[in-house]
């Protein structure tokens, strides 16, 4: 009779609220510099991780309007996993046609989430341009997708996961944590 090995999770905080706030301000500044205030900008937060980030960015970018993208039906793993219940349904605060759409997510890894988000956006119309803003780019891309705007670049291992928390009311409570699954001893 063999014993199954249990795994434990170790966590370490990598960024505090102040560092994350600075990264978000830099994202907003870069977006605002590229897009004049008269331009129609839709900041679409990908549910779940990008929603609060998109809302926060919108408060810092003149004329930007935040929305939500639910990518559940565009996921490429839908056959292997049940459809997840996302935070909120898709809500686009204006016409996608001829707009500048900036997809917003907390962590960019394989690119599959962004691919699903692009499919959801194009179900609603044809934007003038689509860009990507992410708080954390952790690398390990599986698809040829790159962010136009990146707040923080982290080099993490394949067995590590990045968890973000963007507090809707208090930026001082924002955190980025790396968790690692370790075999039990």
Image (spheres, grey):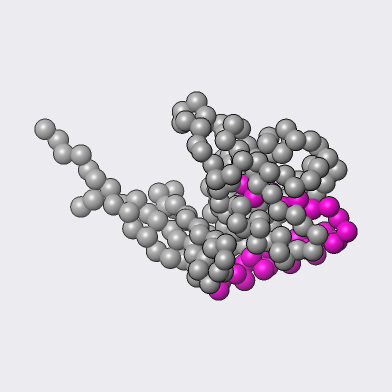
Task: Provide residue 32's location: percent of width, then percent of height.
Answer: 78, 63
Q: Residue at x 32, y 54 (%)?
A: 9
Q: Which is nearer the eye, 170 or 49?
A: 170
Q: Is residue 52 visible?
A: yes
Specify start and end residues of the magenta stretch as a single range. Answer: 18-46
Residue farthest to the left?
1
Task: Provide residue 67's location: percent of width, then percent of height.
Answer: 69, 49
Task: Provide residue 126's location: percent of width, then percent of height.
Answer: 81, 37
Q: Quarter holding the N terminus?
A: top left
Kindly indicate the quadrant of the structure image that contains residue 63: bottom right
Residue 127 drawn in magenta: no
Task: Provide residue 47's location: percent of width, then percent of height.
Answer: 58, 46
- Is 139 on the left-hand or right-hand side of 45? left
Q: Residue at x 64, y 50 (%)?
A: 45
Q: Residue at x 69, y 39 (%)?
A: 118
Q: Residue at x 28, y 52 (%)?
A: 8
């Amino acid at each position: 009779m063999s014993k199954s090995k249990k795994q434990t999770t170790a966590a370490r905080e990598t960024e505090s609220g102040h560092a994350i706030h600075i990264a978000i301000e830099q994202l907003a500044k870069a977006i605002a510099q590229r897009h004049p205030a008269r331009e129609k900008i839709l900041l679409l937060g990908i549910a779940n991780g990008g929603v609060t980030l998109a809302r926060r960015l919108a408060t810092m970018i003149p004329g930007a309007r935040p929305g939500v993208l639910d990518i559940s039906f565009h996921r490429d793993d839908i056959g292997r996993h049940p459809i997840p219940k996302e935070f909120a349904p898709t809500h686009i605060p204006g016409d996608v046609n001829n707009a500048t759409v900036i997809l917003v997510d907390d962590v960019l890894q394989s690119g599959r989430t962004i691919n699903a988000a692009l499919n959801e956006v194009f179900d609603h119309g044809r934007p003038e341009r689509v860009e990507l803003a992410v708080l954390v780019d952790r690398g390990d891309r599986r698809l040829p997708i790159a962010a136009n705007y990146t707040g923080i670049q982290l080099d993490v291992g394949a067995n590590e996961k990045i968890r973000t928390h963007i507090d809707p009311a208090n930026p001082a409570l924002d955190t980025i944590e790396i968790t690692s699954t370790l075999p039990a001893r």
